[in-house]
Image (cartoon, rainbow, N blue to C red):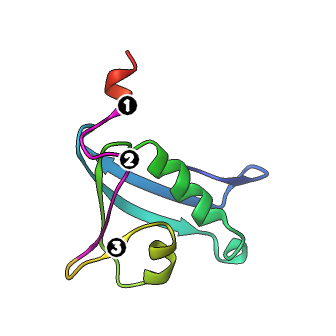
Amino acid sequence: MSLPYAGDQIIGTARGLSNGICNAYIVDVWTFIPDRHQGIASTMMRILLDTLQGQHVYLFTDYSIQFYKKLGFTERETCMEQIIGKWLVNTSLTDS
């Protein structure tokens, strides 16, 4: 999970669910309305996606399609998707 703060107030969240090996889902992305359009959601997503190396990441949304495309997601019939790095090459498993 990625959480940006303004002072002591959380102004956004981006959460993912992963099996830690090959598949992940973006659960939700939210930015406090007064703080939108300042790059906060993009930064949260980049941080989150960086933790999902080697995974096929799925995202189900009816909104902000162009936003997610700018982050590298491809629109499919039922979802948006992206492979982070090389699929099934998970650096977090090989670093130990």
Magenta-span inclusion, residue 90 = yes
How far across and down, in percent of the image, does residue 94 sit? 33, 22
**Which residue type carries mark 1?**
Thr
The residue lying toward the viewer, choosing from 58 and 69, is 69
Circle 1 packing at 10 Å, graded few (<14), some (14-19), many (20+), is some
Instruction: Say the numbered circle drawn on residue 91.
Output: 1
Residue annotated with mark 2: 85
* Residue 51 placement (x, y as % from top left): 44, 42
Image position, residue 31 (x, y; %): 59, 68
Quarter of the image that includes the C terminus: top left
The secondary structure making up most of the magenta span is loop
Under circle 1, the secondary element is helix
Q: Which residues are magenta?
A: 79-91
Residue position marked by numbered label 3 in the rendering: 74
Residue at the extreme right: 7
Residue type (three-letter) at the residue carrying disc 2: Gly
